[in-house]
Amino acid sequence: MNHPVYVSTRGQAEQLGFGDALLTGLATDGGLYCPVEFPPLPDISADLDYRDAATAIMAPFVAGTFDEAELETMVGLAYDSFRDPAVCPLIDLGGGHHLLDLSKGPTLAFKDVALQLVGRMLDAELGRRGRRATILGATSGDTGSAAIEALAGLDAVDVVILHPAGRVSDVQRRQMTTVEASNVHNLAVNGTFDDCQDLVKAAFNDRDLRDAVSLGAVNSINWARVMAQIVYYVTSARAARPDGGPVSFSVPTGNFGNVLAGWYAKQMGLAVNTLIVASNRNDVLARFFQRRALEIHQVEPSLSPSMDIQVSSNFERLLWEASGRNGARVADLLGLLRASSRAEVPADWCDRIDEAFVGYRLGDDETLQEMKRTFAESGVVIDPHTAVGVGSARRFMESDRFDGEPVITLATADPAKFPDAVEAALGERPDLPDHLADLFDRPESFDVIDNDLAVVADRLRALQHT
Ligand SMILES: *Cc1c(COP(=O)(O)O)cnc(C)c1O
């Protein structure tokens, strides 16, 4: 088999194999690495173990870096950390609507599915190369804890996580700041998640800094994360439709990494009718589907903080495909967006995107209503992010585009992560699982910093001397 090749969405960076794409994160031209070819899906039956499906689906993407036996070992260790033998179980809500529970990992959000694996891949690849790396990430709440959980205590990496001060939930913050490991460093930035994400991008674009501290990324711009997420689209489609018939997916969306994995599954041959992009009040994407332009507004805090994002990094990967892989035009469009907060997307790109995607938005009140309604109708407690997905699926099922095929909504977090919202909707606070029961008694450690690259750069350089 030929080794897979990864290219940047801006067309100027060198092509890489999987191992280099894994360690590089953001491409040197500011773009994101994407596979040149989509390997066809292997045969996956409805009763295949999640781990075996994961190994079979991902093997062609990692060939040349990890052989199948190495991959199988890492996959096994990653998913043994989950609290359900099915890893990502499917729950029937009735009426052809299913919930795919992605919250069974150690930090109670779907980011564990990718990061439990990617952490092991990073450690293995750095170890083989005899290298260390500084993993820098921005989090709107859940990536940070999932990255910290996956990387704490490893010899080959320091982990530096930026979160927007005061804009993540107490549970989310404590899951990051109470991990006692000398390689874990939490910085609370006076700003929004988009500011944190910009700081990470700016650090990567500073070539001297990037080389001096050997920066690596575990944000969803890292291809390996998107890749690991392809798996549960396939396994859940098979579980809902053992005959291989089509399904649609509703995905609570922020940075567009999760729903993009569904689009890759479709390119690999999975029968996917529609991918529903579910947004909260930060609805750049929902407006894009109506107006065919990207328009960045101020980020407004919502009940679903992990989706409080205006600049969805991974959307760039879809634009690149929709443009016919024209890196120069993608770079122009994103440059315009950055400069003027608005960019029209060419009609032919939009037509290609509309074939696979629709977008809906739910405000905070609608989110609480949906949490109530789902509990009343199905007895299932859902978190506010998942509620945005369930409500969007409901609207899709009432629209002209609905074809009667099953809809799978991705449940992206355990409700215990967002007790205030659950209490507001249902009048009762959910309990944390046993392994987090004493979270509020553990000591926290983090520093508050200004939204300034120079401050972040100093912190990163200082780590090289400790
Ligand atoms: C990260 C996150 C999302 C958004 O996922 P993207 O891949 O950024 O679109 C949705 N819900 C929860 C709970 C999350 O942690």
Image (spheres, rainbow, N blue to C red):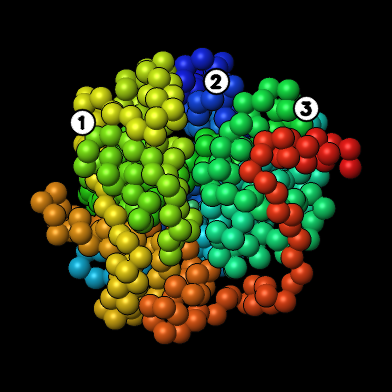
Q: Which mark is residue 284?
A: none
Q: Left of 365 or right of it: where is 55?
A: right
Specify the quadrant of the image occupied by residue 409.
bottom left
Q: Amino acid at mark 2?
A: Asp
Q: Is residue 150 visible?
A: no
Element type where label 1 sits in the image: helix
* Distance between mark 1 and mark 3 Cα atoms: 44 Å
Specify the quadrant of the image occupied by residue 411.
bottom left
Q: Residue at x 20, y 59 (%)?
A: 395
Q: Which mark is residue 212?
A: 3
Cβ atoms at labels 3 and 2 below 8 Å apart: no
Q: Left of 367 or right of it: where is 201?
A: right
- Mark toward the start of the polypeptide (1 vs 2): 2
85 shown above or below 455: below
Q: Amino acid at mark 1?
A: Asp
Q: Residue furthest right?
A: 466
Q: Which mark is residue 351?
A: 1
Q: Residues within 10 Å of mark 1 (few under 14, many from 20)?
A: few
Q: Residues within 10 Å of mark 3 (few under 14, many from 20)?
A: few
Q: Residue at x 61, y 37 (%)?
A: 200
381 shown above or below 362: below
Element type where label 3 sits in the image: helix
Q: Nearer the viewer, residue 7 or 406?
A: 7
Q: Which mark is residue 29?
A: 2
